[in-house]
């Protein structure tokens, strides 16, 4: 079976995608995989290890160029958003990026690890649907409610599959971007799951999340529970480490989720393993530096000094507005200065 797989990444984070690529090839030995990597800046020499891996498994990697400047005229993302514009390349996938001989394609993402054979899901009959994806049962309640509010269906982007030929026939790129405009009016930024949920309303076929995809982050662990998530790891085909503004990933463990150990099992054999480790140190050092900066600015001295200054200011104002007058205000300032010096002296001698 030929499997067409879509993944987007760039020079900033492509080395982490190695785990997704290797686990994809290892767990789908009976498929001839055409991996379409959509990127704004990657060149073939950048992916020397990945091309060697593809050759080893009898698969293919094709880089598709994505123009972020053109996309930036239509796509809206916040400056501090962890989703780059390049992630929205899926809007252009059907009409401008994919070769004409691609009739269907499956999406994975660079922050995933594939743990099962995808060929059965890839071979699913669309039965008139435009997309096949994991069911909405794993989506947060507010996500499901939002899609109902705006008149769309839930779509899970990771491990979603698209009838490229039918989408090309029934929709134009302009119609896709028009749905994105609706999403932006509601949430203030572009978002693929919302856009495709609107575009393919009533034409999305679901595969149970337990056997397709499990997302792991703080929110999913809280809503679904550890036992459920750990059980899904044994039956799902892919683990997705989705994140929010904390950008928690296996290589940036803000907190631990069970799937991180699976990711690191493949990471150990990566040619970038040493870089993963050193990047951990950099992330840790940066976090410590931020903590030190906060501690420096929020110390007992700053807090006490601010309290003292505000108290003196209020008392002086009260003195000037009363019969005590300027002499009373001067007395307050003098008393505050003596108190401050005495406090420092007591702390100094008590901590020696």
Image: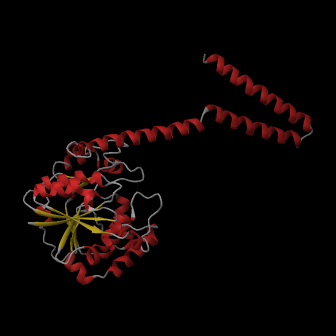
Q: 51 left or right of 245?
A: left
Q: 293 left or right of 194?
A: right
* Residue 238 visible in image: no
Give the residue drawn at x 62%, y 31%.
300
Give the residue drawn at x 36%, y 55%.
12
The x, y position of residue 234, in whole percent, is 16, 48
The x, y position of residue 164, in whole percent, is 21, 75
Tell me where residue 197 sits by quadrant.
bottom left
Compared to 130, does 122 lie above or below? above
The x, y position of residue 105, in whole percent, is 20, 69
Q: Nearer the viewer, residue 8 or 220?
A: 8
The x, y position of residue 86, in whole percent, is 36, 65
Q: Nearer the viewer, residue 172 or 231?
A: 172
Compared to 249, does 177 lie above or below? below
Give the residue drawn at x 41%, y 49%.
246
Q: Nearer the viewer, residue 323 or 134?
A: 134
* Residue 41 visible in image: yes
């Amino acid at each position: 079976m030929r499997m067409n797989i879509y993944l987007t990444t760039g020079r900033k984070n492509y080395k982490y995608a190695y785990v997704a690529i290797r686990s994809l090839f290892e767990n789908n030995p009976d498929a001839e995989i055409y991996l379409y990597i959509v990127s704004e800046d990657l060149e073939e020499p950048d992916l020397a290890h990945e091309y060697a891996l593809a050759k080893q498994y009898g698969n293919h990697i094709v880089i598709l160029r994505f123009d972020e400047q053109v996309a930036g005229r239509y796509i809206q993302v916040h400056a501090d958003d962890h989703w780059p514009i390049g992630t929205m390349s899926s809007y252009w996938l059907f009409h401008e990026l994919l070769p004409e001989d691609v009739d269907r394609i499956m999406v994975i993402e660079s922050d995933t690890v594939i743990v099962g054979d995808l060929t059965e899901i890839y071979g699913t009959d669309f039965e008139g649907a435009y997309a096949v994806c994991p069911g909405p049962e794993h989506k947060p309640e507010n996500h499901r409610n939002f899609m109902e509010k705006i008149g769309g269906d839930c779509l899970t982007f990771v491990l979603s599959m698209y009838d490229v030929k039918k989408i090309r026939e029934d929709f134009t790129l302009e119609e896709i971007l028009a749905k994105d405009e609706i999403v932006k009016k509601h949430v203030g930024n572009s978002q693929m799951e919302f856009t495709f949920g609107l575009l393919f309303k009533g034409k999305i076929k679901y595969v149970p999340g337990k056997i397709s995809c499990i997302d792991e982050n703080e929110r999913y662990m809280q809503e679904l529970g550890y036992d459920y998530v750990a059980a899904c790891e044994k039956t799902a085909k892919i683990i997705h480490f989705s994140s929010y503004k904390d950008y928690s990933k296996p290589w940036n463990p803000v907190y631990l989720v069970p799937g991180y150990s699976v990711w690191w099992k493949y990471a150990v054999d990566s040619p970038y393993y040493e870089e993963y480790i050193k990047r951990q140190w950099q992330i840790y050092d940066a976090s410590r530096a931020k903590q030190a900066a906060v501690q420096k600015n929020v110390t007992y001295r700053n807090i006490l000094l601010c309290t003292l200054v505000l108290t003196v200011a209020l008392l002086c104002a009260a003195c000037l507005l009363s019969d005590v007058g300027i002499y009373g205000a001067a007395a307050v300032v003098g008393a505050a200065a003596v108190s401050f010096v005495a406090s420092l002296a007591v702390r100094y001698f008590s901590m020696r």
